[in-house]
Image (tube, rainbow, N blue to C red):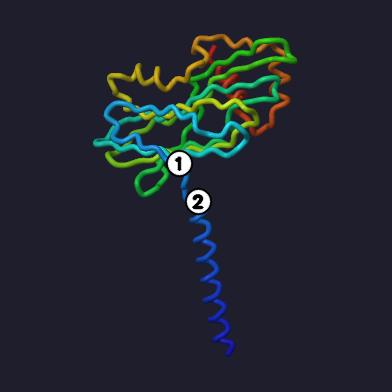
């Protein structure tokens, strides 16, 4: 009898473990809206204004394929905006990852130091700020199918920045054209000097939640590049 109960307990435990594992797998499945770039011969860019204008979680899956092994560059770019440190447009808790056809992680995007710069205008009480923000991943890929998965939580505010996603071969003859198309309208020029007006910047940074790093990182990188 004891043996039967022990076996029954083991079977029940195994069933529960399988159930929990199945739920965990279901929770990690990426089922967000998707976009297919198709085969990448040179480069491809998507300007996506589809995410919600109010605070919400946004996610996008973008697929592409390569006919041969290539050095590639993946990008996400947008312009972060803030008004009086209260109304903002941007994302925090960002995730920018690349997977192969077996959904094995290939790489994770990092802050793009080449797309930096920002400025503020107006007196402190009514200050408006703009800052470039980008994530990028450069890697060598074999021929095959791949997917980019991006997710993040929108800052509070009615302003919705267009998101620019792109994939380019590093040796593409039209790489300069790619950089032009992946750069959002209204982006701060790369050689722009940040004029954040001292106390205005300090006030802005102190009033933002610690988890919101987009502007902070952009400003730090811009200063270090001087």
Q: Do the residues labelled 2 and 1 touch (CB within 8 Å)?
A: no
Q: Identify the residue shown where x is 34% and y is 34%.
A: 37
Disc 2 marks which residue? 28
To which quarter of the image does residue 68 belong?
A: top left
Relative placement, left or right, of 11 versus 201 is left
Mark 2, residues whose alpha carbon is within 10 Å: few (<14), some, or many (≥20)?
few
- Of badges 2 and 1, the one in the foreground is 1
- Residue at label 1? 33
Q: Which image quarter is the C terminus in?
A: top right
Q: Which residue lies furthest to the left in this view?
A: 68
- Label 1: few (<14), some (14–19) or many (≥20) C-alpha neighbours in 10 Å: few
Q: Which of 163 and 15 is in front in this view?
A: 163
Q: In this view, does 80 lie above or below 3?
A: above
Q: Picture coordinates of residue 49 (x, y %)?
A: 49, 29
Q: How far apart are marks 2 and 1 (CA)?
A: 15 Å
List x then y, in percent, for residue 17. Answer: 53, 66
Q: Is residue 171 left or right of residue 121?
A: left
Q: Quadrant of residue 89 in the image?
A: top right
């Amino acid at each position: 009898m004891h043996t039967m109960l022990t076996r029954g307990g083991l079977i029940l435990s195994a069933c529960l473990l399988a159930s929990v594992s199945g739920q965990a797998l279901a929770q990690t499945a990426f089922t967000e809206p998707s976009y297919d770039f198709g085969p990448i011969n040179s480069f491809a860019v998507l300007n996506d204004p589809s995410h919600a204008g109010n605070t919400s979680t946004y996610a996008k899956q973008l697929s592409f394929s390569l006919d041969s092994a290539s050095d590639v560059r993946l990008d996400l770019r947008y312009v972060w905006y803030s008004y009086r440190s209260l109304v903002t447009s941007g994302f925090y808790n960002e995730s920018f990852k690349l997977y192969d056809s077996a959904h094995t992680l290939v790489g994770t995007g990092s802050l793009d130091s080449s797309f930096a710069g920002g400025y503020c205008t107006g007196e402190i009480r009514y200050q408006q700020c703009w800052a470039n923000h980008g994530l990028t991943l450069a890697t060598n890929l074999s021929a095959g199918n791949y997917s980019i998965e991006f997710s993040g939580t929108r800052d509070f505010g009615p302003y919705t920045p267009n998101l620019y996603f792109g994939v380019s071969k590093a040796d593409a003859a039209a790489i300069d054209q790619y950089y032009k198309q992946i750069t959002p309208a209204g982006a701060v020029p790369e050689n722009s000097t940040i004029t954040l007006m001292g106390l205005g910047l300090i006030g802005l940074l102190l009033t933002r939640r610690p988890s919101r790093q987009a502007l902070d990182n952009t400003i730090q990188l811009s200063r270090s590049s001087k």
